[in-house]
Image: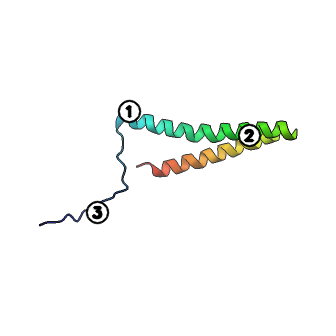
Amino acid sequence: MMTSTKPRNKAAKPQPNGALAIFATLADTTWRIVVPTISLALLGIGADLKFATKPWCTLLGTLLGFGIAGALIKRQLKELP
């Protein structure tokens, strides 16, 4: 009886091909950009209204959102095959 010496990777995920792969990558990239940027900008607007610091909290929230989005995109690029 012969056994295979090829290691099995149980954590390997099947990769979609063609148009589905492109769509999945675009959708994944989109949420990584939109969600942190918009949500932190909205939190900044709320903080500006509450503390009368217009426009500083909005600016800070937007810049922080861009930074988080950049970090998420960088992580996504490392995961690509």
Is any atom of residue 26 visible in this view?
yes
Residue beneath the point at 36% across and 40% down? 16
Q: How is the image coloured?
A: rainbow
- Mark in the foreground, 2 or 1: 2
Direction from residue 57 to residue 37 in the image, left or right: left
**From the image, which quarter does the N terminus lie in?**
bottom left
Residue 26 position in % (x across, y down): 49, 36
- Mark in the foreground, 1 or 3: 3
Rendering quarter of residue 39: top right
Mark 2 or mark 3: whose residue is earlier in sequence: 3
Mark 1 or mark 3: whose residue is earlier in sequence: 3
Residue beneath the point at 80% across and 40% down? 47
Q: Which mark is residue 19?
A: 1
Amino acid type of the residue tagged 3 in the rendering: Pro
Residue 76 position in % (x across, y down): 50, 48
Residue beneath the point at 59% across and 49% down? 71
Amino acid type of the residue tagged 2 in the rendering: Leu
* Residue receiving disc 3: 7
Mark 2 or mark 1: whose residue is earlier in sequence: 1
Q: Residues within 10 Å of mark 3 (few under 14, many from 20)?
A: few
Distance, label 1 to label 3, CA atoms, is 30 Å
Q: Give above or below for 36 relative to 10.
A: above
Residue beneath the point at 70% across and 41% down? 40
* Residue receiving disc 2: 43
